[in-house]
Image: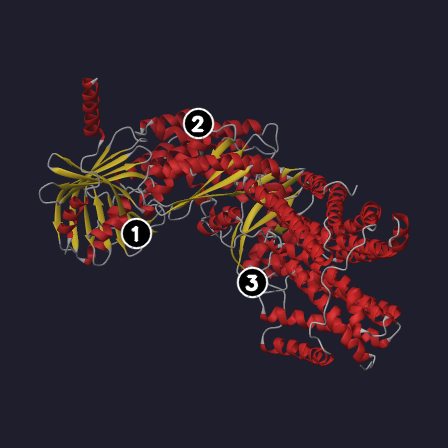
């Protein structure tokens, strides 16, 4: 009788160890990460992105650079070598350019085509705890190797079509290393930050690319 | 008979009345009570007939965050689907994957149903050589582009079939390219689930109510379980609305109104009888007689009119208040005279029958009103009072005479003068009209409430959920469903074009801010015939195009939508061999088209939406509506009803007043009594004006129809009092103790009957009850306490 109780207790504790998320919703990690962002007015990120889509046979990989100017609410996103696509946002306008083919499209930001989690990148990463809490619900935080994985659910319209949004930050310095977006249709986007430059120089010309010779179209 | 215990007598007849109430078929269709020639009423009728699904329940889900709503809707939909005995289908906002698997049939149909040019252009893009290029461009855009929703859509739709909205944009929705999402709010914190009920006849509100009774615990239990699995402060609000919820609610409220008002009237009248006569056995038989009257009238009313409306629920209480008066006359006469039943009938019968006939005529005059609901109520009361007179004469009278062997003591209240002196009566006669005029100058001229809906149910949870739905779904607020009808599909397209012209003109005049016309969602036989060859030719390209998609790097999922579209075209081409137009295939296509297009009883109907700048105004209704186009506008309906009632008052009320003055002149043959009678009406009107200006009591298109009833009772009471005063040479005390006591009983019992409607669910009925109860009480007070003093003054009778 006693041994069966012992056996049950052992199974119970084992089950707890297996099924309880480690450090569930531990916001101290987020607080430390946010602390690294205070005073940041601009950022330049060199990234490598892998898109695994249900509708495409092989994953798509691309390298690119993202510039963000928090002060003036604008960004520039560029991929490919040579550059294949440039996306800039100034205020409420989004400009999409394809240097190969010399075509561009203007569309209002937030017109329904910029969700699926990418608006999180376009809108800039949170820089304070209050901003973070306003935009994300933390599902769990988990330490894996030398990183913390902050698994969240974006709130509001950014969460449309997204099942999970994971921030990956350094375990030691709490700098952001990348993001992983899992979409509801089973697709995913994994972005690894190769180099992050805080308070980088962001000249205005970056956000107002020259459209000479470009033709307007609808992509 | 007198030995039967009173409670047994009452119980037997109450059971009979209750059986009759619960066997009445109430109609929950509120528009059936309104003037049928108004385009707003026709619009509501057509909307209900062609587009409302009796069994479609709408479940609304509201939370503070979109993800909570998504998770809740997923879980609730699953729960509902696990009850096939109650639900045949559950529709919720589709995910992208579901849209891909289910949207092919709809897209294929929209291309087929649209004009030939865009389809020919698409066919050109699908030709060998062109299609591969288009697919490659899509792949390049997905690989190198900004990863947004359009990239995800392109990955499932590399040939851009879903861009049909851009191609047909202007035709699809008039000038408004993007229609509101019918399933979710813009911020995602509100979603709706459409549930098709099964297992019962939803046209019967009692069955719908029973079905809903089984549904509510399921939803409630799910809500409790789901919330217990969430964070403690999670907010979630579930609402049930749609036709079954409305029907169950309206039906239940009507039964409740009738039961409560009848029982309240019975109890109050019994108390009044006890106070005035202090006898329990005759009271039991009197109450039983009233239950019998109610049972017979309900049976006869149901036989003559079929389903009774929400307004008719109020007739029973009014009838009780009126019919009891005949019983009282019989009882008093039996007690005072000691006559046997046949002699008693001969003595009081003619008076009672004439009184019943006069009351019936007053209530029948409500047929001149444009309100069909009010006419029906008037007819029921008219039938009821005649039945009431007969029941009292032939059922109650034989019982009443059995009590006259037991002489009654002179118990009960005796009326006093109430401190009303000649001086007081004179001052008040001058002061009240002056105060009324001053109130109108200082306050506000009494007018009909502008935004009044007589049949709106108070405290309606399903109406609250419906209003929340209108508020949350972008662009729905103040949007008015517009129904276009025709006798065939070709004519419907033509009528829609004509409606479009009217709507454009209204927009140009600044009367409408927005309009959504479902042109592309309505079968267009001409377009489909023209496009048939193109889709047949395209069907032959299916294998090649699918192979090209696979070759470009798209997976099977990436080719699925294209494959479904080609399959649907094959099927539509086959349908067109035998039919004038192809019907959309697939669950999503059928659901989407059936919301906007309907064929029933040989009528083809399309549903558009317009958004008036001034919803209460009627100028836009006149501009948009014609013999084929109607609007289901509640906003302008209030204005239309007010206009109609004003016309009714001029057309019916003024001639009626002229006739009454003539009748009074003949009855009194005395200009002094005629003047006195008319002045009492002016006095009562002045009191009502003061009350309207300084109390919450307001006039509306429904209760204003009670004016003829008030004037009728006012004149009636006045005639009785003036003749009594003539008989006793102006002796105020004598008249008050004789006819005065009878008038107090009749006035109070009628006021109780009307007043019991104050708690009715329908605003119109409740306001009618309050106004009539107040008016009758004022009539009674004036006739019993003021008129005798004025009579003496007019006839210069000194003390």
Q: Residue at x 69, y 72 (%)?
A: B418
Residues behind callouts 1 and 2 on a single chain: no
Reading the image, the residue beneath label 1 is: A94
Q: Nearer the viewer, residue A139 or A60?
A: A139
Numbered tag placed on residue B541 in the rendering: 2
Q: Secondary structure at mark 3?
A: loop
Mark 1 and mark 3: Cα distance apart in space: 35 Å
Quick one: B53 or B269, which is closer to the camera?
Answer: B269
Marks 1 and 2 sit apart, C-alpha to C-alpha, by 37 Å
Which residue reaches farthest left? A172
Label 3 chain ID: B
Circle 1/circle 3 CB separation < 8 Å: no
Instruction: Please rate how many residues cluster around mark 3, counting C-alpha atoms within 10 Å: few if below 14, some from 14 to 19, many from 20.
Output: few
Q: Quadrant of the N terminus of chain B?
A: top right
Q: Residues within 10 Å of mark 1 (few under 14, many from 20)?
A: many
Q: Quadrant of residue B333?
A: bottom right
Q: Nearer the viewer, residue B495 or B249?
A: B249
Chain ID of residue with mark 1:
A
Tell me what residue is drawn at x 35 percent, y 29 percent: B557
Q: Residue at x 63, y 46 (%)?
A: B254
Question: In the rendering, at what x and y percent does residue B116 appear?
Answer: 52, 39
Label 2: element kind: loop
Q: Looking at the rendered structure, which numbered label has been put on residue B509?
A: 3
Q: State the image coordinates of residue B134 (x, y, percent, origin top left).
A: 36, 36
């Amino acid at each position: 009788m006693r041994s069966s109780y012992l056996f049950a207790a052992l199974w119970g504790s084992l089950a707890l160890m297996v099924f309880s998320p480690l450090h569930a919703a531990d916001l101290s990690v987020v607080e430390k990460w946010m602390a690294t962002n205070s005073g940041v007015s601009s950022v330049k990120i060199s990234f490598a992105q892998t898109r695994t889509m249900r509708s495409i046979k092989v994953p798509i990989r691309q390298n690119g650079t993202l510039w963000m100017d928090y002060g003036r609410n604008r960004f520039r996103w560029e991929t490919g070598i040579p550059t294949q696509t440039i996306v800039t946002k100034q205020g409420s306008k989004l400009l999409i350019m394809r240097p190969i083919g010399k075509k561009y499209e203007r569309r209002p930001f937030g017109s329904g085509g910029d969700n699926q989690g990418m608006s999180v990148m376009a809108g800039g990463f949170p820089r304070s705890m209050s901003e973070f809490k306003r935009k994300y619900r933390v599902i769990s935080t988990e330490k894996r190797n030398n990183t913390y994985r902050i698994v969240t659910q974006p709130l509001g319209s950014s969460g449309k079509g997204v099942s999970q949004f994971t921030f990956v930050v350094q375990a030691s310095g709490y700098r952001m290393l990348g993001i992983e977006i899992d979409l509801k249709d089973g697709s995913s986007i994994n972005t690894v930050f190769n180099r992050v430059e805080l308070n980088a120089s962001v000249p205005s010309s970056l956000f107002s690319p020259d459209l000479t010779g470009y033709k307007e179209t609808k992509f | 008979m007198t030995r039967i215990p009173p409670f047994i007598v009452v119980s037997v007849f109450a059971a009979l009345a209750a059986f009759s109430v619960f066997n009445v078929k109430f109609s929950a269709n509120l528009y059936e009570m309104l003037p049928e020639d108004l385009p707003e009423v026709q619009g509501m009728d057509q909307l209900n007939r062609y587009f409302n699904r009796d069994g479609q329940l709408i479940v609304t889900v509201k939370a503070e965050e979109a993800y909570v709503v998504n998770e809740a809707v997923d879980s609730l939909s699953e729960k509902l689907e696990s009850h096939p005995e109650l639900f045949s289908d559950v529709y919720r906002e589709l995910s992208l994957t579901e849209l891909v698997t289910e949207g092919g049939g709809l897209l294929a149909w929209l291309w087929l149903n649209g004009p030939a040019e865009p389809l020919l252009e698409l066919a050109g893009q699908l030709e060998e050589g062109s299609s591969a290029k288009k697919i490659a461009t899509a792949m390049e855009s997905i690989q190198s582009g900004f990863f947004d929703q359009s990239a995800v859509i392109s990955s499932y739709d590399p040939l851009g079939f879903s861009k049909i909205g851009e191609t047909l944009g202007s035709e699809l929705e008039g000038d408004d390219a993007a229609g509101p999402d019918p399933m979710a709010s813009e911020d995602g914190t509100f979603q709706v689930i459409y549930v098709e009920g099964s297992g019962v006849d939803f046209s019967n509100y009692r069955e719908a109510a029973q079905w809903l009774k089984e549904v509510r615990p399921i939803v409630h239990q799910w809500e409790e379980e789901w919330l217990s699995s969430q964070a403690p402060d999670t907010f979630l609000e579930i609402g049930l609305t749609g036709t079954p919820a409305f029907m169950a609610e309206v039906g239940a409220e009507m039964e409740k109104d009738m039961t409560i008002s009848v029982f309240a009237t019975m109890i109050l009248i019994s108390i009044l009888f006890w106070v005035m006569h202090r006898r329990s056995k005759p009271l039991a038989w009197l109450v039983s007689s009233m239950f019998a009257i109610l049972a017979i009238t309900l049976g006869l009313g149901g036989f003559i009119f079929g389903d009774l409306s929400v307004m008719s629920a109020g007739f029973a209480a009014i009838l009780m208040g009126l019919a009891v008066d005949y019983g009282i006359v019989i009882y008093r006469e039996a007690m005072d005279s000691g006559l046997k039943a046949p002699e008693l009938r001969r003595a009081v019968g003619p008076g009672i029958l004439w009184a019943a006939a006069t009351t019936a005529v007053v209530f029948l005059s409500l047929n001149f009103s444009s309100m069909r609901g009010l006419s029906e109520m008037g007819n029921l009361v008219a039938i009821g009072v005649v039945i009431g007179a007969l029941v009292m004469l032939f059922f109650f009278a034989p019982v009443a005479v059995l009590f006259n062997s037991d002489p009654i003591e002179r118990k009960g209240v005796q009326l006093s003068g109430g401190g009303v002196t000649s001086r007081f009566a004179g001052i008040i006669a001058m002061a009240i009209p002056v105060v009324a005029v001053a109130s109108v100058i200082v306050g506000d001229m009494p007018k009909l409430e502008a935004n009044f809906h007589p049949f709106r149910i108070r405290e309606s949870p399903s109406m609250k959920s419906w209003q929340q739905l209108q508020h949350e779904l972008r662009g729905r607020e103040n949007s008015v469903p517009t129904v276009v009808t025709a006798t065939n599909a070709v004519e419907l397209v033509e009528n829609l074009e004509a409606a479009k012209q009217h709507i454009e003109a209204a927009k140009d005049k600044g009367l409408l801010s927005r309009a959504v016309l479902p042109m592309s969602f309505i079968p267009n036989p001409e377009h489909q015939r023209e496009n048939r060859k193109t889709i047949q030719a395209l069907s032959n390209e299916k294998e090649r195009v699918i192979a090209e998609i696979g070759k470009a790097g798209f997976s099977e999922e990436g080719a699925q939508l294209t494959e479904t579209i080609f399959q649907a075209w094959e099927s539509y081409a086959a349908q067109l061999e035998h039919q004038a137009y192809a019907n959309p295939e697939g669950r999503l296509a059928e659901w989407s088209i059936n919301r906007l297009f309907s064929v029933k009883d040989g009528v083809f109907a399309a549903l558009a939406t317009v958004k008036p700048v001034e919803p209460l105004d009627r100028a836009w209704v006149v501009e948009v509506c014609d013999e084929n186009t109607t609007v289901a506008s509640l906003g302008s309906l209030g204005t239309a009803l007010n206009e109609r009632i004003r016309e009714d008052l001029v057309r019916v009320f003024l001639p009626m007043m002229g006739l009454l003055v003539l009748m009074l002149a003949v009855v009194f043959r005395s200009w002094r009594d005629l003047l006195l009678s008319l002045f009492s009406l002016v006095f009562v009107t002045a009191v009502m004006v003061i009350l309207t200006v300084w109390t919450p009591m307001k006039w509306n298109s429904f209760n204003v129809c009670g004016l003829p009833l008030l004037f009728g009772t006012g004149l009636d009471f006045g005639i009785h009092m003036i003749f009594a005063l003539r008989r006793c040479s102006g002796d105020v005390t004598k008249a008050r103790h004789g006819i005065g006591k009878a008038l107090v009983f009749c006035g109070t019992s009628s006021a109780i009957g009307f007043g019991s409607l104050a708690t009715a669910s329908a605003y119109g009925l409740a306001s009618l009850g309050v106004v009539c109860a107040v008016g009758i009480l004022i009539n009674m007070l004036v006739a019993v306490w003021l008129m005798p003093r004025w009579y003496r003054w007019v006839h210069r009778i000194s003390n």
